[in-house]
Each structure stands twice: as structure tokens, then as C-alpha cells.
Amino acid sequence: MIKYGVIGSGWIAEEFVKGAQTVEGMCFAAMYSRTYKKGREFAEKFGCETVYTDLEELAKSDIDAVYIASPNLLHYEQSKMMLEHGKHVLCEKPITITPDEFEELFSLAQSKNLIYTEAIMMMHSPLKDKVKNALGKIGKITTAHFDFSQLSSKYKALKNGENPNIFNPEMKTGCLRDLGIYCYYPAVEFFGIPEKISSSAGFIKTGADGYGTAVLDYPDKQITLTYSKIGQDYLGSQIFGDEGTVTIESISKLTGVKIHYSDGRTEEVTGEVDKHILMAYEAENFYKFITDFEKNKKEYFYINKMIFEVNKMMYEVKNQCRIK
């Protein structure tokens, strides 16, 4: 039995706990929130009795692991504290703001025989391999366009003069780290590391990036990424081959994927999957890495290599676009 704690009480944490409930051996044993009332409300939804408002008390408790879903700014320091106290860590994206921070914490985890990885849906999902298989059916791929543009539920508050966390650059948020990251992962997973990245971003009044674009150049192909938190996409993403096209309704979930062959045939690759099920795959991998590392270490190291490569790319984009 792996007893885990949760840091953060937003909707994403709820979806994770829902998913983890389907994983045998995962037990939600402790909740941390800055306010006891909010922590208690969250914990009671899932039958958890232990609530902390002191992070160090959580770190010193008898839990085995922690899932971190706090604001981006806090990921590094909270992960470090948990690792230093012997807890396995599954941290929401972006796992750290810089690749140096990730390397430091990954090394710390290694030195303590602990698991430290990112809760990024596609890297833990079996749908990834289905999409990879589909790409082998459309001939020579020369171009692709990945888009994740979603009008933020907090945009109305922003327009009313408020400064929500997701649009506050002091919290290390903004569009690249919130939505753009979901475009960089499939680009690297499906096509590898590009030879060149050219990127730009648009900024809103808070100083955060509200939208952005990147062009990834490879020797034989070019991939375009677009992302926005102040506009809504309805067309999805596409990968173009000379014998067909793969369309993807949700690039973050890899759902709604179809092959459109040049002769007019279509083939469904993936349908719709509930968010908590996709997060259950994260919880399942986390459990496997902790309880049977030798059997699963190849996958663990591969995922963490991809985390590092994407982190490096996003850091380069951050610097190109002068994102805070």
C-alpha cells in the first residue's frame, strides 16, 4: 500500500485523486492546504481524515509519497522538501521552471532511491503508442501543426481588472507553461529533438504571455506549435503525410484521433477518455515505479529523459520570447 498526500486543492487535484482511486494499492492519506477549511473540504470528498496546514508537518508524516498540484512557482521548493524527507514525488507540469532545477532534484531523488517525475498525461498514457502506430500509416511526414488554444475560465476576471494566478507572471504561469507544454511533448515524442526552434509570444497587461507560436525545424520536416489562453480552438491538430493525415481533437489528451487516408477512407485511432482516467494512468505508473522499480526502470528513465528535453526546449523558448 502506498499512502500518498496531496498538495493543492484545485480541480486538477480532484481529477487526480478520482483517478488514483481506481489504482489498487494507492491510498489518499493526507491533504495539505494553506487553510484548514479548504483542505478539510477537499479531503472529505474522498474520505481522507488527515489535513495539514504546515508543509513541514506533511513532509515529516508517515506518508510514502506526494502528488503536488500547487502553483508553478512552488513546485521546486515543495518537491525538494518532500524529497529531502524521503517522499516520492509526482509533480504537476511544469515540474520545474528551469532544466537545472530538474537535474538537481532528479539527482537528489536518485541519491535517496526515490521516484521523482512529472504528472504529464500523454507520457503516461497508452494512447501515445496508438498515435505513434497511426503515424506509420500515413507515409512520409513533412509537416504538422499542434494547437492547444483554450479560452481561460479566469479571462473574465482578468478583463475585470483582477490578476488571477494563471495570468500572474510572478507565479511563473502564463500560456507557454500552462498549455504550450502539451504541444512540445508530442513534438519531441513523435519527431525527436529539432535542429532549430523559432518562437514568439504575445503578452497581456499583467506581463504574462497570453499566446505563443513556435516553429520546430528538422532535417526533413517542420512542426508548428500554437497555443493561447485568450482564444478558443475548434479545429484541433493535424499531422500531414503523403499518404494521409492524422487529426487530433485534443493534443493534451491524445483523444479524438483519426486517420484520413488519401483514398478517402477514415480510421478511428482513439475516442474520448475521461480526464480522471488519463490521470489514473499517471497514478498507476507512479505506483509501479515505486513498488517495482527494477521491472519498470526503463520506462521511468525514458519518461524523465523526455521531461528534461521538453524542459530545455521550453526554457529556450522562454528566453527567446523574454517570458518571465
Image (cartoon, helix red, strand yellow):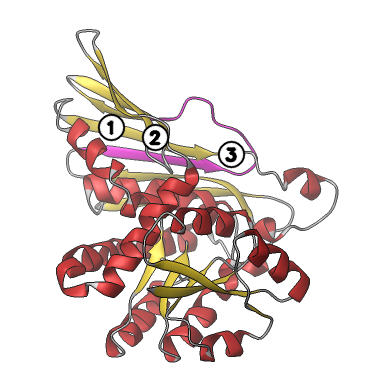
Q: Is the Cβ of the residue at disc 2 closer than 8 Å to that at disc 1? A: no
Q: Amino acid at mark 2?
A: Thr
The verdict on residue 322 being magenta is no
Callout 1 secondary element: strand
Q: Is residue 17 left or right of residue 309?
A: right
Q: Which residue is mark 1?
A: 143
Residue 307: which numbered mark, if any?
Answer: none
Q: Residue 49, image x and y in percent? A: 63, 74
Q: Position of residue 211 (x, y in %)?
A: 57, 45
User: Picture quarter containing residue 317?
Assistant: bottom left
Figure check: 66 above or below 82: above
Q: Tell me which amino acid carries mark 3.
A: Gln
Q: Which residues are magenta?
A: 221-237
Whether the magenta-drawn stretch holds residue 226 is answered as yes
Q: What residue is shown with label 2?
A: 255
Identify the mark at residue 150; answer none if there is no mark. 3
Between the residue at mark 3 and the residue at mark 2, the CA separation in whole angstroms equals 16 Å
N-term mark: 2 or 1? 1
Q: Position of residue 277 (x, y in %)?
A: 43, 46
